[in-house]
Image: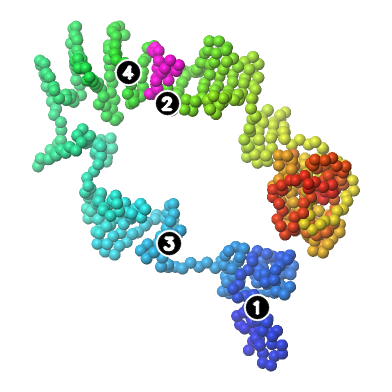
């Protein structure tokens, strides 16, 4: 018999065993570690620096340090040391950092989700019930193909049952499509969810369609499927409201037709009803002698109105030509139109005057009305001035230089922009938010061509520099947040010029975070628990970094440090936290390095700093090697170099920093080296 249990390897008490409590406690310890197994994570390859009693992890590959050789095992911190348990196939563990459950398959930890093949009911973003066993609450549903087509089936048990799609408003039925009570396809609609009217049925045996409630169409158009342009139209619009007309077809095969034929009328004829001529050709007034013809010429009694329609019956796709007056150039005559208003209908697409010259005191186009100020008024989505074979010039002419010739852009007839010659012969542009107060934008002098911009210019950021910038081009690179210009065949930065010469080292070498002047031998400075020191640094070139380094000259057991980098606000003060490194171990002396991925831009001030957990000593720059920090209300006799604040080591670094002049300190700045990638 084994001394351990076969599943969890718990030690068993043996007959006459001394110190049974040791074996019993060991078994309890293993049970405490493995029952309700929940690990912190499964991505660590080395133990954390400060584990808590009872912390459990799944050891990741490749394991190092105290975990070396324990890949895939459960590591538990118990009694100040690490214990390792080999998992068996089928074990489950909850990974707290991922909020997921994993299972051991005998070799690896894998995801433990195994959905059931059948479900009694399923609710997606809502609750399913006994009737609606599948319920979905969503803006849309997608049933996708599995490589070819896709078919949705709604099956019923017998013809008297229902298989349909029901469309609802607030859970009240408004339309139903499907097989409702028989095998005929039906479309039903309802205004209240209770009473449904059948709009359409399709017979399953013949395919014939029935419209029980009739068909509404104004007009009803029948088309030939082989020739869609061939059609017949039935229009009931002329019927008066509520009128019903019945038409019965004769019990023979025949054609429906109108009255046709040729007739000649002599003498006077009066038609008291509607007179319609349907022939393809009709002529009125064919006399060649002195003749007078009248059309709608009867005197209209006072208070009545008269409408004369000529050529108004054209159907869609037809062409109507209306000719007034003689067409020969040698024939003379005139056309006189009386009345206060001449209206060209909304369907008129073109008004062609040939070579005639038109004059009008006021002209409104597109429904607009000309007035004494705006003698030409146009209501349209666009206006086209096209060439007549070559160029095109639109001229705005004014009487004297002090007058204005301008284009005004308006909203609700309130001017928002003016462009042109406004009160002088200089070209100018101005804008307004209210139509009253105008702000000048630009002005081009007529005498010199000099362009003046009256307001600041905002250059929107490009994602990258232009591939081939033109000479004199200025742009804003929004990715690097830099202003650049192309002059003399070279691209220059306009907002990051070097004040002090600087040598940018090649990849793998270091940059000193000093001003580049006032050097000397480095000093040392002991830390204080919770102390944070910041000092400004101005990169004199774009620096892409992969390491930050400090030098520990006096180690302290358990001491840690972190390097900080802050951005700066408009006043150059520390603002948002850009980076805080991982812990740097100061329990031994020497260079301490932190891995980073960061780019510092030329001309952009950043604040470098160090956080201490204890009293270890670090190298510092000479006092003269870093910038002086301005601030305060009284003169000081010692240059101040850093901002100093005490923040508990366990607390996060402040962001934003929140500058106060009381934090300015004369201590030397910690020496921080930057390694270029």
| Residue 75, image quadrant | bottom right
Position of 245 with respect to 310 (left or right) is left
Real-space Cα distance between discs 2 and 3?
54 Å
Position of 212 with respect to 143 (left or right) is left
Real-space Cα distance between discs 1 and 3?
42 Å
N-terminal of the two: label 3 or label 4?
Answer: 3
Q: In the structure shown, which secondary structural element does the residue marked by tag 2 occupy?
A: loop
Is there any visible trace of residue 474 in the rendered image? yes
- Residue 494 counted in the magenta span: no
Dot 2 corresponds to which residue? 380
Would you say the residues marked 3 and 4 are in contact, meaning their CB atoms lie under 8 Å apart?
Answer: no
Q: Which residues are magenta?
A: 358-377
Which of these two is toward me, 35 or 266?
Answer: 35
In this rendering, the answer to whether 37 lies above or below 199 is below
Real-space Cα distance between discs 4 and 2?
19 Å
Of the two numbered discs 1 and 3 in the rendering, the one whose residue sits closer to the viewer: 3
Question: How far across and down, in percent of the image, does residue 106 sit?
Answer: 59, 73
Real-space Cα distance between discs 3 and 4?
67 Å
Dot 3 corresponds to which residue? 127
Dot 4 corresponds to which residue? 342
- Which residue lies at the image location 52% right of the left edge and 21% below the top edge? 407
- Which residue lies at the image location 69% right of the left edge and 31% below the top edge? 486
Is there any visible trace of residue 590 in the rendered image? no
Q: Residue furthest front?
A: 634
């Amino acid at each position: 018999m084994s001394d351990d249990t076969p599943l969890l390897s718990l030690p068993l008490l043996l007959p006459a065993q001394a110190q049974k409590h040791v074996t019993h406690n060991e078994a309890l310890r293993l049970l405490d570690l493995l029952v309700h197994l929940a690990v912190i994570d499964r991505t660590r390859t080395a133990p954390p620096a400060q584990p808590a009693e009872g912390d459990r992890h799944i050891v990741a590959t490749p394991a190092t340090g105290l975990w070396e050789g324990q890949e895939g095992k459960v590591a538990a911190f118990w009694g100040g040391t690490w214990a390792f348990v080999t998992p068996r196939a089928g074990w489950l563990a909850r990974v707290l950092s991922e909020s997921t459950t994993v299972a051991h398959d005998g070799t690896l930890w894998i995801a433990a989700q195994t959905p059931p093949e059948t479900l009694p009911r399923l609710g997606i973003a809502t609750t399913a019930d006994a009737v609606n066993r599948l319920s979905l609450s969503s803006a849309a549903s997608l049933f996708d193909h599995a490589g070819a087509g896709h078919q949705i089936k709604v099956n019923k048990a017998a013809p008297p049952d229902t298989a349909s799609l029901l469309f609802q408003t607030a859970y009240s039925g408004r339309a139903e499509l499907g097989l409702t009570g028989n095998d005929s396809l039906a479309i039903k609609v309802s205004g209240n969810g209770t009473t449904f009217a059948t709009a359409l049925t399709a017979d399953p045996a013949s395919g014939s369609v029935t419209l029980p409630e009739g068909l509404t169409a104004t007009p009803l158009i029948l088309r030939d499927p082989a020739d869609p342009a061939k059609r017949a139209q039935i229009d009931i619009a002329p019927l008066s409201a509520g009128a019903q007309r019945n038409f019965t077809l004769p019990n023979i095969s025949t054609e429906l037709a109108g009255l046709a034929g040729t007739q000649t009328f002599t003498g006077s004829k009066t038609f008291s009803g509607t007179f319609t001529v349907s022939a393809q050709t009709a002529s009125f007034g064919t006399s060649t002698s002195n003749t007078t013809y009248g059309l709608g010429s009867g005197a209209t009694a006072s208070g009545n109105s008269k409408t004369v329609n000529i050529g108004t019956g054209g159907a869609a796709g037809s062409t109507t030509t209306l000719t007034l007056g003689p067409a020969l150039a040698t024939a003379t005559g005139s056309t006189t139109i009386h009345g206060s208003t001449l209206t060209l209908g909304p369907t008129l697409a073109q008004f062609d005057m040939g070579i005639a010259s038109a004059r009008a005191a006021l002209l409104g186009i597109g429904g607009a009305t000309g007035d004494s100020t705006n003698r030409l008024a146009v209501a349209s989505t666009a206006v086209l001035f096209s060439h007549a074979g070559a160029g095109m010039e639109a001229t705005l002419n004014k009487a004297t230089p002090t007058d204005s010739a301008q284009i005004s852009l308006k909203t609700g007839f309130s001017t928002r922009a003016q462009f042109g010659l406004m009160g002088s012969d200089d070209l100018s542009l101005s804008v307004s938010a209210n139509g009253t107060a105008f702000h000048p934008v630009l002005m081009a002098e007529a005498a010199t061509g000099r362009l003046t911009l009256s307001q600041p210019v905002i250059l929107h950021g490009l994602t990258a520099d232009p591939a081939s910038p033109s000479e004199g081009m200025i742009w804003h690179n929004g990715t690097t947040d830099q202003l650049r210009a192309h002059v003399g065949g070279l691209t220059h930065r306009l907002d990051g010029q070097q004040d002090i010469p600087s040598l940018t080292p090649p990849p793998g070498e270091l940059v000193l975070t000093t001003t580049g002047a006032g050097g000397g031998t480095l000093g040392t400075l002991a830390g204080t628990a919770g102390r944070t020191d910041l000092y400004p640094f101005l990169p004199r070139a774009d620096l892409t970094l992969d390491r930050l380094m400090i030098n520990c000259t006096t180690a302290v057991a358990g001491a840690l440090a972190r390097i900080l980098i802050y951005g700066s606000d408009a006043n150059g003060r520390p603002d948002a936290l850009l980076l805080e490194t991982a812990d740097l171990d100061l329990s031994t002396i020497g260079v301490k390095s932190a891995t980073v991925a960061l780019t510092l831009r030329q001309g952009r001030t950043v604040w470098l700093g160090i956080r201490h957990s204890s009293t270890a000593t670090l190298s510092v720059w000479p006092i003269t090697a870093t910038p002086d920090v301005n601030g305060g209300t009284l003169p000081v006799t010692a240059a101040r170099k850093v901002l100093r604040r005490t923040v508990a080591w366990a607390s996060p670094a402040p962001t934003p920093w929140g500058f106060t002049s009381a934090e300015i300190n004369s201590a030397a700045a910690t020496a921080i080296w930057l390694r270029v990638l």
